[in-house]
Amino acid sequence: MLRQVLRRGLQSFCHRLGSCVSRHPVFFLTVPAVLTVTFGLGALNRFQPEGDLERLVAPSHSLAKIERSLASSLFPLDQSKSQLYSDLHTPGRYGRVILLSPPGDNILLQAEGILQTHRAVLEMKVNHKGYNYTFSHLCVLRNQDKKCVLDDIISVLEDLRQAAVSNKTTARVQVRYPSTKLKTCPKFIWDFHIIFEAVLNLPERTPPTTVFHSSSLMLLQDGRNSFIGHQLGGVVEVPNSKDQRVKSARAIQITYYLQTYSSATQDLIGEKWENEFCKLMRKLQEEHRDLQLYSLASFSLWRDFHKTSILARSQVLVSLVLILTTATLSSSMKDCLRGKPFLGLLGVLTVCISVITAAGIFFITDGKYNSTLLGIPFFAMGNYPSLW
């Protein structure tokens, strides 16, 4: 009974709608076209890719986000990063390089070459509105001494380099794993860092008026134990060693943490620094044939995720051609009078118009694009025949 009532109601509604369309054909042809063009242009003007990938995998009330926020407030980045790498933290902006030696080689014997790469990163400059910024201007500072947070593996490499310069054998520099005792500690001494912090608190359009001096590297006695388990890879320990001495290692990981000071300008400068960092690593790879350099930045995952849209262009075009071909063939018949191939093409065109309109409404209402939305038009075309 209910089915018959619904069927009669739908038949009556469709009959009246068809009569209305037949009486006003110009209106129903022009209005959808105008709406499609309007929302299509709106989609092009308001198009923005999704910048926060966490929104795609976790809701705003996710317990993981709450716990991470709690961990970041209780264990600040400038205190935890100098001791241990914590997975609870979102590093923010950073540049990371992994240096890998050929199989069978000991990367610790190439301390000088690795330190040259490290110094090249420290001396790298990024230009923004006529001012040059280096890592010392952008780095995360420790609370206790206002020095840049650097990985302790740099100190280990400095010890190895000093031993090589003074004609000592590297065996006398005992590197332990995963914790080792530091002999020297590289620290930055630079001028006006307090003034620079004050400049960062100025409005975004206020240019810095202080000329900053380039940082200088000093080696100071340290003597503390440091965890380097996340900075040294492919470790082979000395056989029967009670203190876990390192015989050889194959990889070293160095991370450079940047501070944005919750400023849009600083975030833009940090993004430029990350881009220059990746370019520098590719350039240094051509110079260091005996090492493999793998660079990573905070935007690397975002870049790889959105690159799927570019890689899927050929598949999307091929799928669209196949759909058009299938729609044409399924609407064709041997009898030319009964065959309606253009009806299938119009069906596909109708779905495309509706998708463009929906995309325009989505972007106008501050929606952001991500590559998972590529499949929506094909889902719509697949479900369209099932409605009949």
Image: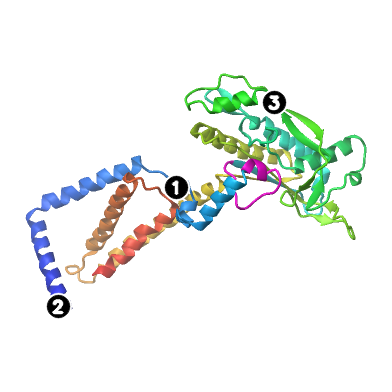
Please report the bounds of the magenta region as a residue range. Answer: 77-93
- Contact (CB < 8 A) between labels 1 and 3? no
Left or right position of 199 against 179: left
Q: Is residue 341 above or below residue 165?
A: below
The amino acid marked with disc number 3 is: Trp
Q: Which residue is mark 1?
A: 50
Question: Which percent across, then down, holds residue 314?
Answer: 44, 54
Visible residue check, residue 15:
yes
- Image location (x, y in percent) of residue 367: 37, 48
Q: Residue at x 72, y 30 (%)?
A: 188
Q: Is residue 219 magenta?
A: no
Q: Is residue 34 left or right of residue 281?
A: left
Q: Between 342 and 47, which is closer to the camera in this rendering? A: 47
Task: Report which residue position mark 2 lands on.
Answer: 4
Tell us which disc is closer to us: 1 or 3.
Answer: 3
Q: CA distance from mark 2 to mark 3?
A: 84 Å
> Coloring scheme of the render?
rainbow
> Label 1 is placed on what type of residue?
Glu
Say what secondary structure mark 1 lies in.
loop
Image quadrant for the N terminus?
Answer: bottom left
- To which residue does mark 3 refer? 190
Residue visible at 48% across and 56% down in the picture: 62
